[in-house]
Image: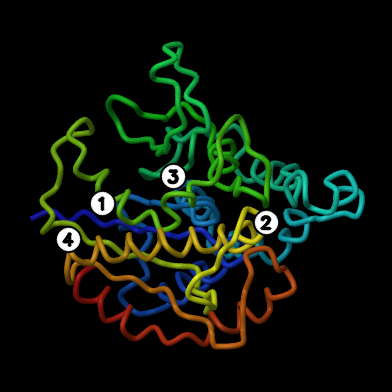
Amino acid sequence: MATTRILSIDGGGIRGLLPTVILQRLMTTPGLEALLSQVDLLAGTSTGGLIALAIARGIDLAEIRRLYEEKAQVIFDDSWLDDLVDLGKLRGAEYDIKGLRRELRRLFGETTLGDLGKPVLITSFDLDNEDPDPDRRQWKPKLFHNLPGPGTDAGMRAADVGLYTCAAPTYFPSVDGYIDGGVYANNPAMCALAQTQDRRHGTPPMLEEVRLLSLGTGLNLQYIKGKANDWGYAQWAKPLVNLMLDGTAGIADYQCRQILGERYHRLCPVFPAGSTFPMDDIGKIPALIRFAEALPLQETIAWLQRWW
C-alpha cells in the first residue's frame, strides 16, 4: 500500500522560525534525515506558505532560517514616514510589501509553481473574482497548487504566490487582489487533506494511506474578559485578526484528528504564560529560537518513526 505524506505549516509571521528550527532538529534524528525528501505534498499558509515554497524549490532549511534572522527587519520595516502617511496606522497597512517582494524575487526569481520539485498547496483569498456575470461576482478562498489536471496554477510565479499568501490584513496591503489565506485556513492541514481526495488530479489515495504532519507556529495564551462585551468596530479591530487565525487553526486540527486518527500528528506548542510572540515583533527572534531549540520533540519523533 503506497503512503501519501503531507507536511502542513501554519501562518504566523516571524514565528515561522519555530517550524523551521523544529524541522532542522527532526532531520538530525537518526532515521529521519530524509524527512523532507519523502513529502508528497507541501501545504502552507502565509509564512508557512513561504517555507513550503522554499522547501519545494530545494532551498536548504539553514537558508530559510537565515531569511527570518537576517531579513525580518527589512520585511517588517515600519518607518515614521509610513506611519505619518497612514495616520498612525488608522489608514493603510502597517508595513510596506516592498521588502518582502524584494526578498521573494531574490529567492525564487522567475521560478513558477510548475518548476518546483514537489507538489505544493498554498492558501490565499481572492477579494474579487471579477466574474463578468454580476450574479457570480464575489470574493472567495483560493488554493494555489501545481498539481496536474484542471485548475492547476503551475504557470504562476512562486514569488507572486508567496506575496499573495502573506498579505495579512492590517499588516500588509493586498497584492493583485489577494490577501493572506489565514482568513480562512491559518492551519492549512484540512485543505491539504481535502486536496488529496480531488479526483481531477488523479486517483485519490485511501485515507488509510495518508500521513499528515501539521506544524504550527506556536500559540500565544490570549483571551477576552467579560461575558457581554458590547463592542463596535474600534474595539474588535485589534483582537479580531488573532482571534480569527487561532480559531481557524484549531478547527482544522480537530477535523484532521477525527478523520485520520493516529495517522495525523500536530505540533503547535503553547508559549509560556506571560510570554507572547507577536507575528511582527522582530525583537523576539532570539527568544523564539531559544524556545524552538529547547522544545521537547520526543512525541513527534516517535510518531514519525511509527507512521512516516
Q: Secondary structure at mark 2?
A: helix
From mark 2 to mark 4, how far is it between C-alphas?
39 Å
From mark 3 to mark 2, how far is it between C-alphas?
31 Å
Residue 34 shown left or right of residue 236 in the figure: left
282 or 148: nearer the viewer: 282
1 or 3: tag closer to the N-terminus:
3
2 or 4: tag closer to the N-terminus:
2
Amino acid type, residue under disc 2 in the picture: Ala
Tell me whether circle 1 and circle 2 mark residues in contact (CB < 8 Å). Answer: no
Amino acid type, residue under disc 1 in the picture: Leu
1 or 2: tag closer to the N-terminus:
1
Q: Is residue 107 above or below residue 267?
A: above
Q: Give me the disc on residue 259.
A: 4
Amino acid type, residue under disc 3 in the picture: Ile
Amino acid type, residue under disc 4 in the picture: Ile
Q: Residue at x 87, y 54 (%)?
A: 79
Q: Residue at x 56, y 83 (%)?
A: 291
Residue 212 quadrant:
bottom left
Tell me whether circle 1 and circle 4 mark residues in contact (CB < 8 Å). Answer: yes
Tell me whether circle 3 and circle 2 mark residues in contact (CB < 8 Å). Answer: no
